[in-house]
Amino acid sequence: MTSELSPVDRAKFASAARAAEFVEDGMRVGLGTGSTAAWLVRCLGDKVRDNGLKFRGVPTSTRTAKLAREVGIEVITLDEAGWLDVTIDGADEFDGDLNLIKGGGGALLQEKIVATASDKMVVITDPAKSVETLGKFPLPVEVIPFGMRTTKTLIEEALGSMDVSGRDVTLRMDGDAPFVTDEGNHILDLHLGRIGNARQMALTLNQLPGVVENGLFIDICDVVVIGHSDGQVELRDVTSGGAQRQRPDAPKTDNLFRDLDG
Ligand SMILES: O=C[C@H](O)[C@H](O)[C@H](O)COP(=O)(O)O
């Protein structure tokens, strides 16, 4: 089947198929959004159908929920799940510390809530999304519709004192109308070129009234699975790019990623 795919889709499929191996019977799994995450959902649906895999999935968007149901995955809400064993999701960029930009598909808010409520976050991606410094991909910021122009001005003012190489802020459109997220909000895309201090950027943006969430995922991702178009897959964990991070209160999952330990 993969021979019919474009090289980019072969790479996405390779990473998704490898990450699907992390899902075991009985797990509660966050299901990401986007074209790479859609491959994951299809791979997991195949495992449910062909291998009798039994797990419950928490989708991060209405799109993912629809696809998950179509392929036979049992879908529950995050509140029903309480806590997740693992979330597997795509990303728009990742750096050497496995910090991410997400939200190219507008699902960053649910994605961040779900990933943060998980023992582990696995990102599935292709090599083109690897960057030294985050920011080439426009940073999505979810804002409430009320007073959106004021919020945009506040963001532009805040960017004035930040270490970035561009400062354009654009409203994401869907045809002639502003794009609307699953939570009924809009997205401002920040064209920054290079984000000198991503942690400070994330904190600064989230302090502004009207901002709901930003697409920077700092210290949330544990493992990046990079698929290549020839079917090869590389795994990078937090120890290969930066300090080991572990949420202090996170319940541990014993058998995940045991193959990364050796
Ligand atoms: O809002 C969308 C998500 O953050 C996606 O995971 C991200 O945009 C990557 O999507 P794709 O796998 O389609 O490149």
Image: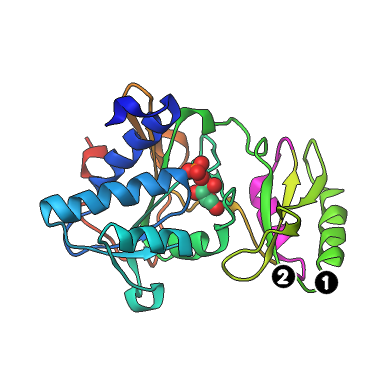
Asked if the stretch drawn in magenta spans residue 136, the answer is no
Q: Which residue is mark 1?
A: 147
- The image position of residue 5, as x and y in percent, is 37, 29
Is residue 89 or residue 237 the one in the foreground?
89
Q: Amino acid at mark 2?
A: Ile
Asked if the stretch drawn in magenta spans residue 205, the answer is yes
Q: Residue furthest top?
A: 230
Q: Where does the magenta region start and end?
A: 193-210
Q: Is residue 195 left or right of residue 54?
A: right
Q: Quadrant of residue 223?
A: top left
User: At x 66% / y 52%, what residue is drawn?
Assistant: 140
Decide: is 246 above or below 167: below
Secondary structure at badge 2 equals loop
Q: Is residue 71 left or right of residue 77?
A: left
Q: Quadrant of residue 135?
A: top right
Q: Is residue 152 left or right of residue 2?
A: right
Q: How is the image coloured?
A: rainbow
Residues under labels 1 and 2: Cα distance?
Answer: 8 Å
Decide: is 191 above or below 120: above
Label pair 1/2, CB-CB below 8 angstroms: yes
User: At x 79% / y 50%, what residue is drawn?
Assistant: 170
Report if residue 119 is visible in the image: no
Question: Crowdedness of circle 2 by 10 Å Cα count: few (<14), some, many (20+)?
Answer: some
Label placed on residue 144? 2
User: At x 51% / y 39%, what residue is drawn?
Assistant: 97
User: At x 61% / y 64%, what residue is drawn?
Assistant: 181
Q: Quadrant of the N terminus?
A: top left
